[in-house]
Amino acid sequence: MSDLQQRFFATRKLTGELAAPLSDADATLQSMPDASPAKWHLAHVTWFLESFVLRDHVAGYRHFDDSFAFLFNSYYEAEGARHARASRGMLSRPTLTQILDYRRHVEAAIDAHWNNLPPAAFDLIELGIHHEQQHQELLLTDILHLFAQNPLYPAYWPEPVLRVAATGEVSPMEWIEGPSGVQSIGHRGNGFAFDCEGPRHDVLLQPFALADRTVTNGEWLQFMTDGGYCEPRHWLSDGWAWVQGEGIAAPLYWQQDQDGQWLSFGLDGLRALDPAAPVTHISLYEADAYASWAGARLPTEAEWEVVAASRHADEGNQLGAPAAVRPQASHASALFGNVWQWTGSAFRPYPGFRAAEGAVGEYNGKFMSGQFVLRGGSCATPRGHVRASYRNFFYPQQRWQFTGLRLAKDG
Amino acid sequence: MSDLQQRFFATRKLTGELAAPLSDADATLQSMPDASPAKWHLAHVTWFLESFVLRDHVAGYRHFDDSFAFLFNSYYEAEGARHARASRGMLSRPTLTQILDYRRHVEAAIDAHWNNLPPAAFDLIELGIHHEQQHQELLLTDILHLFAQNPLYPAYWPEPVLRVAATGEVSPMEWIEGPSGVQSIGHRGNGFAFDCEGPRHDVLLQPFALADRTVTNGEWLQFMTDGGYCEPRHWLSDGWAWVQGEGIAAPLYWQQDQDGQWLSFGLDGLRALDPAAPVTHISLYEADAYASWAGARLPTEAEWEVVAASRHADEGNQLGAPAAVRPQASHASALFGNVWQWTGSAFRPYPGFRAAEGAVGEYNGKFMSGQFVLRGGSCATPRGHVRASYRNFFYPQQRWQFTGLRLAKDG
Amino acid sequence: MSDLQQRFFATRKLTGELAAPLSDADATLQSMPDASPAKWHLAHVTWFLESFVLRDHVAGYRHFDDSFAFLFNSYYEAEGARHARASRGMLSRPTLTQILDYRRHVEAAIDAHWNNLPPAAFDLIELGIHHEQQHQELLLTDILHLFAQNPLYPAYWPEPVLRVAATGEVSPMEWIEGPSGVQSIGHRGNGFAFDCEGPRHDVLLQPFALADRTVTNGEWLQFMTDGGYCEPRHWLSDGWAWVQGEGIAAPLYWQQDQDGQWLSFGLDGLRALDPAAPVTHISLYEADAYASWAGARLPTEAEWEVVAASRHADEGNQLGAPAAVRPQASHASALFGNVWQWTGSAFRPYPGFRAAEGAVGEYNGKFMSGQFVLRGGSCATPRGHVRASYRNFFYPQQRWQFTGLRLAKDG
Amino acid sequence: MSDLQQRFFATRKLTGELAAPLSDADATLQSMPDASPAKWHLAHVTWFLESFVLRDHVAGYRHFDDSFAFLFNSYYEAEGARHARASRGMLSRPTLTQILDYRRHVEAAIDAHWNNLPPAAFDLIELGIHHEQQHQELLLTDILHLFAQNPLYPAYWPEPVLRVAATGEVSPMEWIEGPSGVQSIGHRGNGFAFDCEGPRHDVLLQPFALADRTVTNGEWLQFMTDGGYCEPRHWLSDGWAWVQGEGIAAPLYWQQDQDGQWLSFGLDGLRALDPAAPVTHISLYEADAYASWAGARLPTEAEWEVVAASRHADEGNQLGAPAAVRPQASHASALFGNVWQWTGSAFRPYPGFRAAEGAVGEYNGKFMSGQFVLRGGSCATPRGHVRASYRNFFYPQQRWQFTGLRLAKDG
């Protein structure tokens, strides 16, 4: 079995394991337009493979169900009409059982035709693996958001997260000087990367330093105690409007119990806040305000990448097995894992970027307005998925991903 | 077994049968704020019995689950805080299975304590039966609305509705003269009635006539062909704003196939429109505009009631068994069943009306603004539920119930 | 000069006097979609006369400006396309000066042709007078709403309102028994009336009593102190949603100064609240909640009318001259004037009502859904305009008119 | 008279001349939350001078009106509470006359104290000049937007714009190669610049070329004819959602007459579209879609600046005198003037950027999210205001400024 084949089936298997605790109803609900039902994620990644591998490269392939292209296309305009995103949560039929059958059907077909697939199909399978890994993370964060709407606060994985011994004190933050002058960023071209990670190109960096760890819950509480959410001068104008309009006063999923103790909700339910763990579920606006309050700033994506280039991308707290994930104090100094780190860089094309031809070309280019780049992966990112050149992106008010921050300053 | 006991358990049993085709996901979704998840209906009617019968009248009763009062109270302010109505569809947990257990638990407790209940508890059981019948109808109309959001248009009961022989020609509408002068309306006081049906009182009616049957789909198509939806002079001002704002051009659940043939969606799926059957799923605005176009008017609720008083309330096409329900041409001349008939009367209190004390007193009085009265019951109303004095009410733009119209004119 | 001619020119003159303090900018702004710019009122009543009197009945009449029909038609669908209501406040051109010229042009043309007008035109002039009186009241209430948006709280007429001696104590409310049994309501047919006031017809009334005066500011403060705005059981369900959604905690235009004293804003600016004066600027929801709190109810429109039929309609505090108007304690026992009194009756057609043919037929009939009837006129209603049979109507949440309440109870 | 003094009073004078055609009503209306009333612009720039020059640097200065700080502060949080932006259009009082008095009062006070002002005050006057120039442009574009809401389409300056001889043919677009490698951008430090234009710093540019002129109306019509607004693959995802949600099908202020001829509305009224003139009133989304359709891209702000650095910033069609302004074909090859040119760069801080201390420090930094940079100035930008390093910024959907585009490509 080739490495690709092994990774392909391992990825499919992990998806199934992550989905194992889902009831039919869990898998069907959509808690907000930004999120998708778990059933939709399970089917969509399968539709991607069915369309671009089986339909396009296996003669005579019979679709599992002709209606699924309409239901499970995400945003590929070239693939024709599709169900409205905000209505994905109205589909009690097909059932979870049918979607799991669909998954098996497509896996079996790919397995059966593996040896006869053309090279182009293997590129699409590679893309399909990485695409599915992205949806593994989204499936978890979307379920977390859904369960947070339930006043019973159910735990997806009731077992407490394994914590490394006692958390103890957090060491004071130190600054790491980064390499400056002319530096190269972007994907080097060996191994898989998404289109937006290239072309590799030179950038000119002024001297700078990055924090050696991400900001903690304890530090965030200081920001709150100091009136951080009430003082407009720390905030971007759009951020201040958001804070006031939405009544934001703490990270998402934080709440106080009757004694005023802070709790945070996660896939393992409501737990006491760990002051040593990295703060997460914050928006770019909050990250930027914190940095301003702290007399620092957010790193640019280039600064982050040139520091990260010398690290192992599989270090830190990333998703390996189907068990409750939380950012952990014990991995706070790793550059990868735990929490996605907001950068101060808008998500825009690198010099020389060109979208690929065809439907697959819609992958990233069309999202290059209004969003900010995040780097490093999180505790919900499948290990092996992230890279130093990896560019994730979200709108500045979004915070249902495991998003945190690492400070930077001019050197 | 007393008649009450028999009716109580028969009602509970019918609810179970109506819910039998539900998947966990079907039962969990909420398609709009006006509708509730089936699971919620199943639990709410049970919470009503648990609270007002068991908690209040059975010493030492243990609640099935302490969180359910919060989750399944509908609108009883006196019963404390409750889950927001528009968020009822976010509850994948508790599961359908747990809700069905809850139903059995409460039924068993009532059964066990039946012989020791005080008289006040039996009044509440009687109220509970009628309350549950209301929710049987809502469960069906809410599922219909949910399934209509699904581009696959699933049928809840795939079996076609039984149709009485050939539908054939519809007889021309005839006018029935109603009794005028001083007349009495409102519930007579024997047998159950909701609070808003009394006090019985005299009204003074001018001479009038009611149509001998409801308006048909075929007649509605003529209204459409004649530009009914495009001509503001037929419409109430609010209705015209609604037509334009929402782009309304046909009754709810109507659509045209590729050949321009009209179909209507029902609990038995998409079916060709039957021109002889009563039109349904229309708003008060549409009913009023049609009447204006037809040179007639809507009846007042008093006019309808004095005519209906001489009829059998269990006549016509009403809900008896768990099978797909549709308005039928064959029962169009019955005053009861098939479709709720919009009246021109605002839902306001009868002279001398006083809301009951306590939580149960919130039953109807507080809804007496902005809504119009409908009379007669529909194909989804459980047989035995409706009466000549029965006052149903909805906002003038609502149309997901089986709502139709019967014309009236001055005598 | 005929009586009609005298009344016509007096009405036009009063409009001009009411508008005298307006700056061009005052006259142009629209503070909410429900309100219209003063300039629009001034032009619209003139357009009404120009269209239905001059255009239709004077051969060769030349329009003052061809664009005005588009700009100043209110809602007459039969009169063709028109400027969107919510955009009336975008018209800085034509200027106030041009509109005043328009007024003079149309007045001069009517004056010049008066002796040659056909009888039908005189009916329309009569309607035009009453139509303009309605807009006199709206002009004042719309300006009041506009000025209330200005943080400087400018006074339209800075002179304080003339108050009748010392206000002193308010006498305790007494009940007046009304006539019951079969009674007649609706316009008798002599003199002018709007279409919706007829046909006169019999109604059957149960015994009832009306309060001998309207509810005062002082009584309203007791309702507030007693938690009236915080207790859902007093409120209609829609009303409670409105209170919570809009954060309603006092009548419109009330505010507290730094010492906690209540002030109310009027056309004479911000003034200390007079506890003896009738409460005003309340919604139907508030009126109904107060009545419920007070153990009473709102009168029906028929109850109000049969009591009012024996009173003089020109009694009380009504608009006579261009000076600041406020409800006055000294006229609280008059049935007419001071504040419009919310009734519990939905605005629906009387038995036998038919809308007139043609554009003028759109006058009232199409507004007969969702609104409640108010009776009696206010301090801003031109004296001579209101009648016992007069039916005013607004949506239950609207409160920028001078709206108050008089309690009723079953006899 | 010093150069500063001369420029200060010349700027104030030009503002007065630009405002001369305003009626009181024109000056009071606000056509959308993004725009401000002309009266507000006139007062706000004056408040800026009154607060930061007179209040802070002239002992004993008496404010013209104590309420004006509340009314005319724009967004300076440090300056305390202020009137809500979206409600600026509700202020018929103070009148235009009072605002013009306010302007004279502040000018006279500055004039009287000029010789005694400390150096810091002169820096603020310099800033005040540039601030007022920004509002001169906004005053014109806001009035244009307001007049575009008026169905009469009034001309602000009815005289036709002076056009340079016959427009004739547009020359084919040529590419200008720009300087690449390490280049410097940002303000050099001599002369005035806004805070966001610095610090000057090195950037690394790949080879590129800029178009020698901006895109014309005629070229834009080709894009439209080719289905540019209907083809999702040209569009950013947010842009496509905007096109569909808002029903966008042409630049702002374009309309077709009854014969299908395109007209555009400007400060000189409705005029036939000049195919040779630069297209304007387009959003970033439209600019980006056009570039994609044309096989090119938008320039980055650094690319634009390094080309512009060798040009005279006062070239081209910029605002000099109070007369109708329109982009002109005759100046299309100038890099400055005519239309602001959208770049593909998000508005973010330059390396080493720090906001100034105090209220003035809120000038630009807090707007650095969600917006795109525009370069070059427009026909409504006061001559002398713009520079090669000048960074203007708007949200990608905004288009009521004179915004256009110049293509770029990789070298």
Image: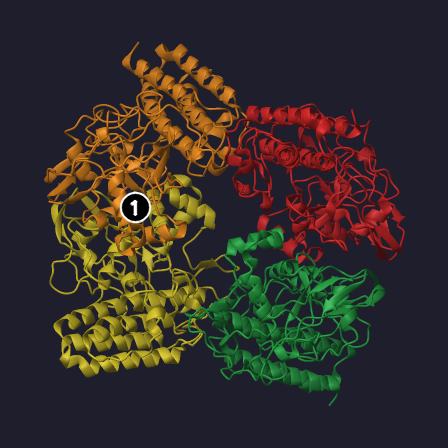
Chain colours: A red, B orange, C yellow, D green
Give the residue drawn at x 70%, y 48%.
A356
x then y, percent, for residue C280:
35, 57
Crowd class of label 1 (few under 14; some 14 to 19; many from 20; radius 10 Å): many
In the rendered image, the vertical position of residue B254 relative to residue D325, given as above or below: above
Residue placed most toward the observer, C400 or C4:
C4
Q: Quadrant of residue D316?
A: bottom right
Viewer can see residue A258: no
Q: Is residue B214 left or right of residue A194?
A: left
x then y, percent, for residue D9:
66, 85
Q: Label 1, on which residue?
A: B286
Residue type at mark 1 is: Glu
Give the residue drawn at x 23%, y 67%.
C130
Q: Is mark 1 on a helix, strand or loop?
A: helix
Residue placed most toward the observer, A264 or B316:
B316
Give the residue drawn at x 55%, y 42%.
A85
Q: Quadrant of residue B46?
A: top left
In the rendered image, the vertical position of residue A21 relative to residue D347, given as above or below: above
Residue placed most toward the observer, D372 or A55:
A55
Quarter of the image with the C terminus of chain A in it: bottom right
Quarter of the image with the N terminus of chain A in it: top right
Q: In this view, does B263 lie to the left or right of D287?
A: left
